Amino acid sequence: MADVCDLHVLAIGLEDRPGAVHSVAEVFSGRGLQMEAFHGTAGSLDADGHAQALILFHASDERADFVTRVLRRLSSVSQAELLGLDDTRLIQSVLVRTEESHSGEGIRCVDLGGGVSLAAATPMAMQLWLASGHAPQRLGAVRIDLLREERDRI
Amino acid sequence: MDISVIGASGGCGREVVTRLVSEGVLGRRELLQLVGGNPLSNRPCYLHGLRADLQDAYAENIPEVDVTDSADDIVGDIVVMAAGTTFPTDAGKAGNLRSRDDLARANTALFEHFAAAVARNRKGNPPLVVVLSNPVELGVHVFSQYLDRDYVIGMGAFSDSQRFRWEIASQLGLSRQRVHASMAGEHGLGMVPLWSTVRIHGLQNSELAATIARLRDGLTLSDFSTRLAAEHAAVMEEMMADAVNGPVRALARIARLPPDLRVALKPFPVHYSQAKTISATATATVELVKALCEGRAVEVCAQYAHRGEQGIHGPIGNRLILEGAVRRVVPGDDLSDEELRLLRECGERCNNKIQEWVHGRCV
């Protein structure tokens, strides 16, 4: 499956109302697509008042494109953008055990105290670091976020 | 499954949309897409109003309803093509033979517009296209040029078969559910009644044969097209002579004919009465769409772009096995040699006519 289905990231702007996420999830489940990760923020928690979701999923490029087009037709979706893992606006982060050194190109670590650090990097760099064997013990799930500039706000 | 209806603002398209919603064919989270796109429309907001009206009327089980004017936005797993010009309903102009050719040429561009858009965006994941617009054979031909032909069917023969079942059932005093029959060939005066396929619940062998013979009233398959042409001329003359009452008298005339002739002729006075055949067409469409949504394998009679199956070439009606797409043409070993011959001739005539419409040359 991995050699025909790439990992895609969908950045979705949602109407901030109950059921919006359900509608999005139905588009995936109805097509037998597994959401590998779902990160959502309600509009009330977002400084700009926009609800946003990032969804990671495996699919062929054609299928990913089609799912994106279907999502754009939903009344609860204001925007849907398909991103590649090499998109420079994407940042992955993970909580790790604080260590003296943990070499990883492109990895930035912030000590949160209590032996816990937050490591952040682009998805490509993060994937390589986590697979390298040099990464310290993970203490949480790998999360993803989309850097937003004012003009690119979703 | 998500469903896109192209031409949802037309009489038939609107009826299909309303029935899909009212009968709960789609789940609440599935998508019903209303596709417009007529740049000459004098009511560009219609579909938005229709959506609001549907949501008000069927709030308890309304699916997600999307409105778009762009053919590139079509995302349905099933696409119902109901857009296009239709014949005028003025019985006084019914005899204008040029109108069928004009209709075909006008709708060719429309068929190509939508077929190209669907192919552009859905090549690897084609929807099943169900063509309602006329000439339905032309619509099936054009869409089959852009998409895999197994994903394109025409509703004409399905509607004709439903009418055939009804005409037989009503004449025998039975419910339609107890009759099975297929009307193949062209959706129009070139249809081919497949009397070999007629099955009537409760009748077998000699009793079935005797009943069928009684129904046919001496009209053989070899005489069918000649008789049909003659009766059609008489019906049209009746309607043109009196645009107001002509359709009613035509219906009365048709009621005295055998069932196969009634199937072919009745739509004309229904159309020119201005009632049109909206209910019958929409009902047949929704029935087919329901079966497709349920994922069942079904046998239907529908237009399909034959390429040699049973020696047939052309987008004519025939019995098909559908499982999300056309899986195969039902073998014709239960048909008579004459029925098969007529189907092959019908296919050839259809192809010639389509060449004339599409390429402007007579064959």
Image (cartoon, rainbow, N blue to C red):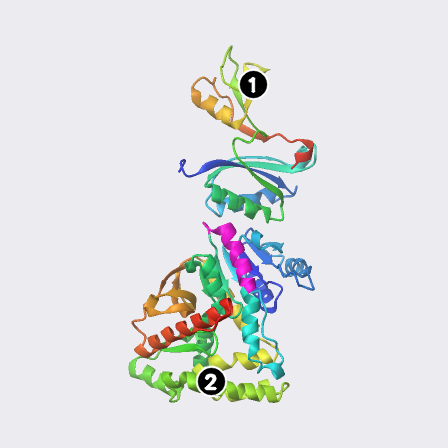
Where residue B243 sits, quadrant-wise, is bottom right
Write the residue at 44% across / 72% down.
B352
* Residue drawn at the location 55% of the way across and 85% of the way down: B236
Q: Does residue B160 appear to the left or right of A110 in the view shown?
A: left
Identify the image quadrant of the C terminus of chain A: top right
Q: What is the C-alpha distance between the residues marked 2 and 1? A: 83 Å
**In the displayed structure, does residue B242 sit left or right of residue B197?**
right
Q: Residue at x 56, y 79 (%)?
A: B270
- Going by the numbered disc 2, the residue's amino acid type is Ala
Please report the bounds of the magenta region as a residue range.
B109-125
Q: Position of residue A122 (x, y in %)?
A: 54, 26
Examine the image and state in which quarter residue A82 appears.
top right
Sort mark 2 into few (<14), some (14-19) or many (20+) by Cα contacts within 10 Å: some
Q: Chain of mark 2?
A: B
Q: Is residue B318 above or below residue A36?
A: below
The residue pinned by badge 1 equals: A108
Residue nearer the viewer, B86 or A50: B86
In the rendering, at what x and y percent does residue A72 appear? 59, 46
Question: Is label 2 on the same chain as label 1?
Answer: no
Say which chain tag 1 marks: A
Residue B186 percent across, percent down from the top left: 44, 74
Residue A101 visible at all: yes
| Marker disc for residue B229 | 2
Residue found at the far top of this picture: A100
Residue that sits furthest to the front in the current view: B361
Identity, as a three-letter code, of the amino acid under mark 1: Arg
Secondary structure state at the residue bearing disc 2: helix
- Residue A42, horizontal then vertical, whole percent: 64, 36
Is residue B236 a member of the stretch shown in magenta?
no
Q: Main secondary structure of the magenta part?
A: helix
Q: Are marks 2 and 1 in contact (CB under 8 Å)?
A: no
Q: Nearer the viewer, residue B354 or B341?
A: B354
